[in-house]
Amino acid sequence: MDHRALGRSGLSIAPFILGTNTAGWTADQATSFDIFDAFTDQGFGAFDTADVYSRWVPGNDSESERILGRWMKARGNRDRVQIFTKVGMDLGAGGKGLSAAHIERAAEASLRRLQTDYIDLYQSHLFDAGVPQDETLKAYERLIAAGKVRAIGCSNFNADQLGEALSLSQDQGLPRYETVQNEYNLRTRHKYEGDLQDLMLFEGLSLIPFYSLSAGFLTGKYRTKADLAQSPRGNSVSRYLNDDGLRVLAAMDQVTEARGASHAALAISWLLHQPGVVAPLASVTSVAQLTALLEGVLLQLTPEDLNLLDLKGL
């Protein structure tokens, strides 16, 4: 399987990243282990987590990292997988933000939960307007020098915020963000295409798109308000169910019928055909869901397919 580079970090991954925000939430530990096993059995190895996953569940405390760490220890496969985690979201008493002090504490805590001595990609989970970006980058520099982090990325940054960080990295000789993790999919394109994409392509950065399936909307299962009412995900999907969303589904219907592919596989394949995208990111709650998504990695689209899906104004 072809691997794709993470910016200019020297790291490369197979072209799909498994999100683990469901681990300890909508997928218990046993189910998560089964999903992780199936993922690596098919030749993939990049896992995305965060210190805040899934603290929103009563009684949970960074369960995603803990379950991932237990799985790696049980399988003895740390050297065969790539671990991406994030820092900055509100941990309650555990702090938040991108100050040097918080990053250094949070990194040590993530390493303990993951039961590893290094993180492959450590990501700023959100922009922190209250902390100078060079303070954040210098904290990452120390972690990289200590061998605890291999590369850094950011998430939920816009072009101006990323541009400032890249300038500081160049001017001060600091590590630079090699990846950006932002929302991008067939239904939501404006959060990447434009100034951010232009900057990233010029600088050789890689996009890790989250919400690859628009919270499930791009599976094609949600076309009416009645469909939303039948699903516990209805509220999160509802923002996509409008005229623009139905335009996207109509175009997808034509391509899936011609290709004999699922809507989910098409959504993944389309992302892999977009400039700057290193690998789509998505989470699942079953091995069956994972299998359906991974079909998209092998699905090749023609120029005609891509033109049909190239809808404006999204």
Image (cartoon, rainbow, N blue to C red):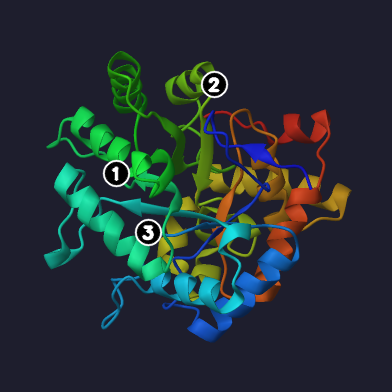
Q: Based on the displayed image, in which of its 4 quarters is residue 92 positioned?
A: bottom left
Determine the secondary structure under disc 2: helix
79 sits to left or right of 253 = left
Q: In this view, does 121 lie to the left or right of 283?
A: left
SS for tag 3? loop
Mark 2 vs 3, N-terminal side: 3
| Residue at the spot of label 3 | 50
Front of the two marks 1 and 3: 3
- Amino acid on which disc 3 is placed: Ala
43 with respect to 69 (left or right): right
- Seen in the picture, residue 57 relative to 243 is either above or below; the reply is below
Horizontal and vertical percent position of residue 251? 71, 43
The residue tagged with tag 1: helix, strand or loop?
loop
Query: What residue is pinned by disc 2?
Result: 201
Residue 134 locus on image (x, y percent): 22, 28
- In the image, residue 262 sits, relative to residue 99, either above or below, namely below
Gap between marks 1 and 2 measured at Cα = 21 Å
Residue at 24 percent across and 39 percent down: it is 139
- Callout 1 environment at 10 Å: few (<14), some (14 to 19), or many (20+)? some
Say which mark, if any, is on residue 126.
1
| Image vertical order of residue 53 relative to residue 74, above or below | above
Look at label 2 and name its amino acid: Leu
Q: Could you tell me which residue is drawn at 64 percent across and 51 percent down?
A: 16
Residue name at image x 61 percent, y 44 percent: 279
Label 2: how many Cα within 10 Å (few below 14, some 14–19, many 20+): some
Q: Can residue 48 be seen in this view?
A: yes
Give the residue type that dot 1 points to: Leu
| Rendered location of residue 256, percent (x, y) | 79, 51
Report, in whole angstroms, how far the alpha carbon at label 1 lies from the one at label 3.
12 Å
> Which percent across, then down, holds residue 310?
66, 31
